[in-house]
Image: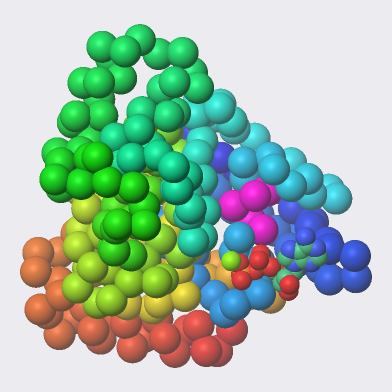
Amino acid sequence: MGIIIKNLNFIYEQNQIFKNTDFHFEDNKIYTLVGPSGIGKSTLLDVLTGFKKPQSGTISYQNVQKSEMLTIFQNNQIFPWLTVSEALALPFKIKNISKEQTDSRVKELLKIFELEALAYKRPNALSGGQLQRVAIAQGLTLDPKFLLLDEPTSSLDQEAKEEIQDRLLDEQHKRNNTMIIVTHDIEEAAYLGQEIILVANQQLNKLENPTFGRENRRHSLGFYEFCILLRKQVRQL
Ligand code: ADP
Ligand code: MG
């Protein structure tokens, strides 16, 4: 079950990004995708959602439709003229979902993401961390089975970053969906990824994360030892 990539070849003009690449994204897991800038992380997300077509290879979607996948893009922009609650209601409007259902779901999301006090504010009145919370809440409105997030915390300070990371872990745990989170931050990859995918040499290299789910990881030496190991692996590739 999940998404199975076989023999993927993706090339931009002369630039081969993936070469005979295989990978199996399983259901109900949280993956982090780590690797240097320009290696192909965002491209992979676009290939998974069907937005970009590979030159060859197969991608089989088992138990998931493309319509049940959603990407939160890097530097996600909320429409400047919409308030936070209007922004959260937008995906429902597009799908013609009833006002009652929309209102109750928007209310729930405002609560989960601590946005109630900001419900009637527009983006220009929000901080980077608040905007990012709105973007992620908006991504969760229709409860996608596969949620793809492209560097969701890259513009945030450490405190806001950690808050978003914990929120993402909670939501994945509650919803049992699959999340694929792109990051270039080693510590974030180790904190969020049940499985960590190192993108290198036109391949997707999987690394199990033995520290995933351990309590109080941010305060444990074992977690930082794993970060050191991961950093070495990324450098070696
Ligand atoms: P990452 O997300 O890992 O930083 P990308 O997937 O955005 O990397 O890009 C991978 C490589 O492909 C980069 O060298 C980038 O410049 C190039 N690239 C991205 N999009 C295009 C495009 N539409 N046409 C040509 N080259 C592209
Ligand atoms: Mg990118």
Give the residue at x 25% y 25%: 105
Judge whether 159 appears above or below 59 on screen. Answer: below
Rendered location of residue 113, percent (x, y): 20, 46
Residue 104 drawn above or below residue 234: above
Q: Quadrant of ligand 2?
A: bottom right
The one nearer the camera, 4 or 136, is 136
- Using residue 6 as the reference point, say whether residue 131 is left or right of it: left
In the displayed structure, does residue 224 sit left or right of residue 9? left
Query: Residue 126: x, y in percent?
Result: 29, 58
Residue 45 lies in magenta, yes or no? Answer: yes
Residue 221 in percent (x, y) is at: 15, 85
Asked if residue 189 shows in the view, the reply is no
Picture residue at 50% right of the left edge, 29% below the top: 68
Main SS class of the magenta portion in the image: helix
Compared across the picture, whether 80 is left or right of 107 comes to right
Residue pictured at 23% horizontal, 36% vertical: 109
**Image position, residue 140 (x, y; %):** 35, 37
Q: Is residue 140 magenta?
A: no
Residue 227's place in the image compared with 79, above or below, is below
State the quadrant of the C terminus.
bottom right
Tell me which segment is drawn in magenta. Answer: 43-47
The residue at the far right in this view is: 14
Which quarter of the figure has residue 218? bottom left
Is 166 positioned to the left or the right of 125 in the image?
A: left
Q: Nearer the viewer, residue 141 or 192?
A: 141
- Does residue 65 appear in the picture of this structure? yes
